[in-house]
Amino acid sequence: YSCASNPYYLSFDLQPGDPFIYFNNLPLKTGFIGSYVCDDANTNDIGEPIDPDFPGVIVHLYDCSDTINPLMTDTTNNLGQYGFVDLLAGNYRLQFIIPFGLRPIQGSTIDANGFTPCFSLDFNDKDSSHSLCLIPCPTLYAGPDVTICYGNPAQLQATVPYTNGSYSWSPSTGLSNT
């Protein structure tokens, strides 16, 4: 082993009277952020160990002070895993690019734009707490088509095939969920 093979090796020529160096304060990149994305295939709106992996989801890593320019990007592999290595201590935020027609399960900390809240990573931390489970957005069945003439009320019944979702009508002029 030679010092020259160490990428963090520095050489100093000290002269009499120069300050003594007690600590090496070079920024070491040793942190890790990573976890997995799963598919709530049984549509129970709960992330469970039996839920299959979800490959192909894009995950961006941001510094909390700049959520415009990602520091790194990864895509979940065949096991639904993503990861960012060699990170400095700092405040980070993830963004999951959620595929069309899917949403995070209920109780997820992921916001409507796919962002996690900001979190801190200390020196040499390994953070695997930011997993995501996706569920298909339910299709609302509102019964057969009904022709409604002006002034004649009609009652429509709507059902959601799974979950306890709510729904609204669009356009909502003159319509209600009662």
Image (spheres, rainbow, N blue to C red):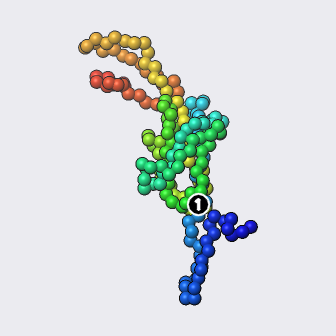
User: Residue 125's image quarter?
Assistant: bottom right
* Secondary structure found at label 1: loop
Instruction: Examine the rendering and report whether any part of residue 120 can be seen.
Output: yes
Q: Position of residue 96 (x, y in %)?
A: 51, 42
Camera-nearest residue between 53 and 176? 53
Q: Residue at x 55, y 60 (%)?
A: 88
Q: Which residue is mark 1?
A: 29
Q: How many marks?
A: 1
Depicted 48 relative to depicted 136: above or below = below
Across and down, in percent, residue 70 comes to 48, 49
Instruction: Identify whether 126 is placed above or below 2.
Output: above
What residue is rendered at 57% in x and 88% in y? 16
Name the foreground residue: 166 vs 57. Answer: 57
**Amino acid under disc 1:** Lys
Residue 120 in percent (x, y) is at: 51, 58
Query: Callout 1: few (<14), some (14-19), or many (20+) C-alpha neighbours within 10 Å?
Result: few
Task: Give the percent coordinates (x, y) of residue 162.
Answer: 52, 27
In the picture, the quarter occupied by the N terminus is: bottom right
Residue 93 located left or right of residue 170: right
**Residue located 49% across and 45% down the image:** 95
- Residue 47 visible (yes or no): no
In the visual, does 122 lie left or right of 147? Answer: right
Q: As drawn, which residue projects farthest toward the right? A: 1
Viewer-side residue, 111 vs 63: 63
Q: Residue at x 57, y 85 (%)?
A: 15
Task: Specify the quadrant that holds the C terminus.
Answer: top left
Q: Residue furthest bottom?
A: 16
